[in-house]
Amino acid sequence: MLVARRDFPGAGALLCSVEVYGAASDKASGAPRVLLSYTLHRGSDEIARGEARPLAPALNGALGGMFGLPLSALAPGGYELALQLVDDVSGQRKELRELFTVVAAPPNAADAAPAR
């Protein structure tokens, strides 16, 4: 069973992957065109924004994309990631919202050891 975590230590990056199925195909090219953008909020404050970019076709027929959020740049606390998807052929729009929490990163064991 797939387990989705919602709490992440404030180190490294949070990788986000998106797949879209069933997008409309352009009559001229036969290919779908879906754009992905995102906004990251903490409360009412916008922390980051990813400008719209096209999703790439995958071998399984889906459109997909991936992006990362630097967790080390985020203060501990609750965040909301809003993904905006626009089917550029049909004009259909969808917004998905995901809540997650950044927790204080545990101290690095190597940093805690006394130097010799």
Image (cartoon, helix red, strand yellow):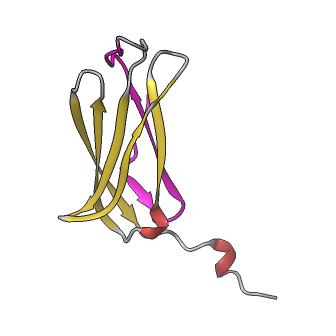
Residue 24 vs residue 54: left or right? left
Picture mark count: 0
The answer to which quarter of the image holds residue 49 is bottom left
Whether 116 is drawn above or below 9: the answer is below
Q: Can you give x and y, in whole percent of width and height, for residue 59 in the image? A: 55, 17
Single out the residue that lies furthest toward the left: 44
Q: Tell me the residue at 47%/36% (across/down).
A: 65
The answer to which quarter of the image holds residue 90 is top left
Q: Tell me the residue at 76%/87% (across/down).
A: 115
Q: Can you give x and y, in whole percent of width and height, for residue 43 in the image? A: 20, 64
Q: Tell me the residue at 38%/52% (across/down).
A: 50
Q: Is residue 15 magenta?
A: yes
Q: Can you give x and y, in whole percent of width and height, for residue 71 in the image? A: 46, 62
Q: Is residue 37 or residue 1 the one in the foreground? A: 37
Q: Is residue 43 or residue 62 the one in the foreground? A: 62
| Quarter of the rendering occupied by the C terminus | bottom right
Magenta residues (range) = 1-26
Q: Does the magenta stretch include residue 65?
A: no
Whether 111 is drawn above or below 105: the answer is below
Q: Can you give x and y, in whole percent of width and height, for residue 84 in the image? A: 28, 41
Single out the residue that lies furthest toward the front: 28
| Quarter of the rendering occupied by the N terminus | top left
